[in-house]
Image: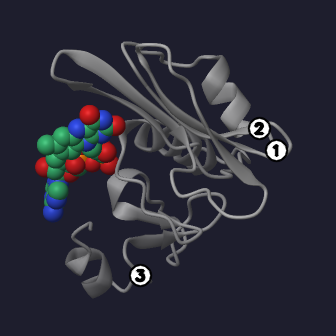
Amino acid sequence: MPETALAREAGLEVGRGVLVDDRLRTSCPGVFAAGDASEHAGRVYGIIPAAFEQARIAAHNMLGLDMPYAGTVPANTLKVAGLHVTSVGEVHAAGPGFESLVRSDPGWGSTRRSSSGRAAWSARSGWAPRRGPRRSAASRP
Ligand SMILES: Cc1cc2nc3c(=O)[nH]c(=O)nc-3n(C[C@H](O)[C@H](O)[C@H](O)COP(=O)(O)OP(=O)(O)OC[C@H]3O[C@@H](n4cnc5c(N)ncnc54)[C@H](O)[C@@H]3O)c2cc1C
């Protein structure tokens, strides 16, 4: 949870983070928020890819360009016991329309897919992508 006391005392609207709209504007005209401190569409990300994406978009909008932010596909790679472990997409995707597919190859974790075939979540060890096909698949509507 971000520390929001300073923003709250300054009069910004705050939920779990500093509330921002689809241009990363706060409730105070001319003030933008990005990264761990911000809350967009009910989401506080707390990961580097979201902070980078929001920073880039906030900077464009601060300069008077009109760049929308539609959220960040959650994706991250951690190194655990010497292996890269990667997750992409909706970790909590479950219920009707989702099925769980578990590959038995060494190095693979599990992948859940929606009925449309879009990857909802995957975790894999031994693989450290920055932007790969699975991340793009998870971001497709
Ligand atoms: C232990 C740890 C491990 C992590 N590992 C990962 C990882 O593996 N992958 C990943 O994606 N993310 C990871 N994260 C999260 C990642 O660090 C954050 O998402 C990212 O740093 C957010 O960037 P930011 O610029 O929003 O905030 P920050 O990097 O926290 O930068 C905020 C800056 O503001 C400064 N600041 C705060 N208050 C004030 C003030 N009142 N006045 C002036 N300056 C102030 C702080 O000193 C800091 O320099 C990790 C975080 C932690 C704590």
Left or right of 113 on screen, residue 121: left
Element type at marker 1?
Answer: loop
The residue that appears at 49% across and 14% down in the rendered structure is: 105
Nearer the observer: mark 3 or 1; the answer is: 1
User: Mark 2, residues whose alpha carbon is within 10 Å: few (<14), some, or many (≥20)?
Assistant: some
Numbered tag placed on residue 118 in the rendering: 2
Q: Nearer the viewer, residue 70 or 74?
A: 74
At label 1, the amino acid type is Pro
How far apart are the two marked residues, 3 and 2, measured between alpha carbons? 31 Å
Q: Which residue is mark 1?
A: 141
Left or right of 32 on screen, residue 140: right
Q: Which residue is mark 3?
A: 15
User: Mark 1, residues whose alpha carbon is within 10 Å: few (<14), some, or many (≥20)?
Assistant: few
Q: Hey, which quadrant is residue 122 in on the image?
A: top right
At label 3, the amino acid type is Gly
Precedes in sequence: disc 3 or disc 2: 3
How far apart are the two marked residues, 1 and 2, measured between alpha carbons? 8 Å
Q: Is residue 105 above or below residue 59?
A: above
Nearer the observer: mark 1 or 2; the answer is: 2
At label 2, the amino acid type is Arg
Quadrant location, the C terminus: top right
- Kindly tell me whether mark 2's CB lies below 8 Å from ligand 1: no
Quadrant location, the N terminus: bottom left
Q: Position of residue 70 (x, y in %)?
A: 68, 52
